[in-house]
């Protein structure tokens, strides 16, 4: 239940690149960026430490390019550069809203972003800065979902929040089937066994091995991210069966 107080101290927010394009179909929608900046800023005001991984699908999709004949590694590197562009755009929107922000890139480009160093990222978070992780893992053949899971573990995030265009995880595509059923709760094994479209299998396995809960929710609804962080049961929770006990123990400590 939403108590108005955060139940998570440090979060990793996974945003899709497509979320930034709004209704344009390509690129970055300035209004969408401003809306995201406002909601993320509200989390910072609550004292939540916010790290972000953002995709690049609104600009370039490596898998799609590879399917059309491009070398997979080259296509993935191009996709990583697209995430840097999105990260810089989100940083600008956040800072215009008065939120101190740092972009850390897994591919070194000193003129526009800091190199990714785990201890530096953690220190930025402790100082109340929003940290945006750009360029995925810095390696081809890994998705930004996997990058989000990896970075969440590296900075000891309490939860991985996956923002989507739908209000959770369904047993089938809800946009094409009105009879689709939304799950409120799943285990990692449920997701893997049912092959549900939550995150890729590598990301889910990483979260499972490290007991990192995932909340899949609709980012397009105003205040949803705040509601999730404050413990309201919206979207779909993917996690260990004893998630509530772990959460309660952390609140007591």
Image (cartoon, helix red, strand yellow):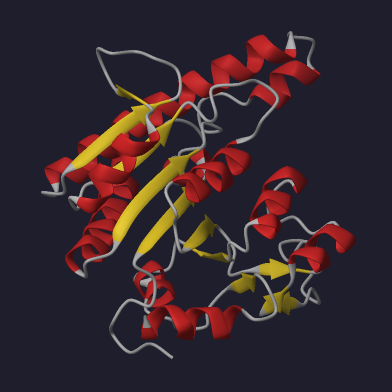
Task: Give the quadrant of the C terminus.
Answer: bottom left
Where does the image place residue 170, in percent across and percent down from the top left? 74, 69
Q: Is residue 70 above or below residue 233?
A: above
Where does the image place residue 11, in percent across and percent down from the top left? 41, 59
Q: Is residue 88 visible?
A: yes
User: Closer to the camera, 197 or 253?
Assistant: 253
Rendered residue at 34%/49% (across/down): 32
Task: Give the quadrant of the N terminus.
Answer: bottom left
Where does the image place residue 139, in percent across and percent down from the top left? 60, 21
Q: Can you name the residue that lies furthest to the right here?
A: 193
Q: Is residue 202 left or right of residue 15?
A: right
Q: Is residue 42 left or right of residue 190?
A: left
Rendered residue at 83%/58% (across/down): 192
User: Closer to the camera, 219 or 214?
Assistant: 214
Where does the image place residue 177, in percent across and percent down from the top left? 80, 68
Q: Is residue 28 visible?
A: no
User: Closer to the camera, 2 or 59?
Assistant: 2
Q: Which of the 4 quarters of the picture holds residue 29?
A: top left
Q: Is residue 97 above or below residue 138?
A: below
Rendered residue at 23%/52% (across/down): 126
How many marks overall?
0
Rendered residue at 49%/43% (across/down): 151
Q: Is residue 84 left or right of residue 183?
A: left
Q: Which of the 4 quarters of the picture holds residue 119?
A: top left
């Amino acid at each position: 239940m939403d108590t108005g107080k955060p139940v998570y101290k440090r979060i990793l927010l996974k945003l899709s690149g497509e979320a930034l394009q709004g209704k344009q179909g390509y690129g970055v929608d300035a209004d969408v960026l401003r809306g995201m900046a406002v909601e993320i800023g509200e989390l910072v005001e609550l004292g939540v430490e916010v790290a972000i991984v953002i995709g690049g699908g609104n600009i370039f999709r490596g898998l799609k390019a590879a399917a059309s004949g491009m070398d997979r590694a080259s296509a993935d590197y191009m996709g990583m550069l697209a995430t840097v562009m999105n990260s810089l755009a989100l940083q600008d929107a956040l800072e215009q809203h008065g939120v101190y922000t740092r972009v850390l890139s897994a591919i070194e480009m000193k003129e526009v972003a800091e190199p990714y160093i785990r201890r530096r990222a953690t220190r930025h978070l402790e100082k109340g800065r929003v940290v945006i992780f750009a360029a995925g893992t810095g390696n081809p053949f890994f998705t930004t979902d996997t990058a989000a899971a990896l970075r969440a573990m590296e900075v000891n995030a309490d939860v991985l929040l996956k923002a989507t265009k739908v209000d959770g995880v369904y047993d089938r595509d809800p946009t094409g089937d009105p009879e689709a059923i939304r799950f409120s709760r799943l285990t990692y094994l449920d997701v893997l066994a049912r092959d549900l479209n939550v995150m890729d299998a590598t990301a889910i396995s990483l979260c499972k091995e490290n007991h990192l809960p995932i909340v899949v929710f609709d980012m397009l609804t105003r205040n949803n991210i705040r509601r999730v962080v404050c413990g309201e049961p919206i979207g779909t929770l993917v996690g260990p069966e004893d998630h509530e006990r772990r959460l309660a123990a952390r609140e007591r400590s």
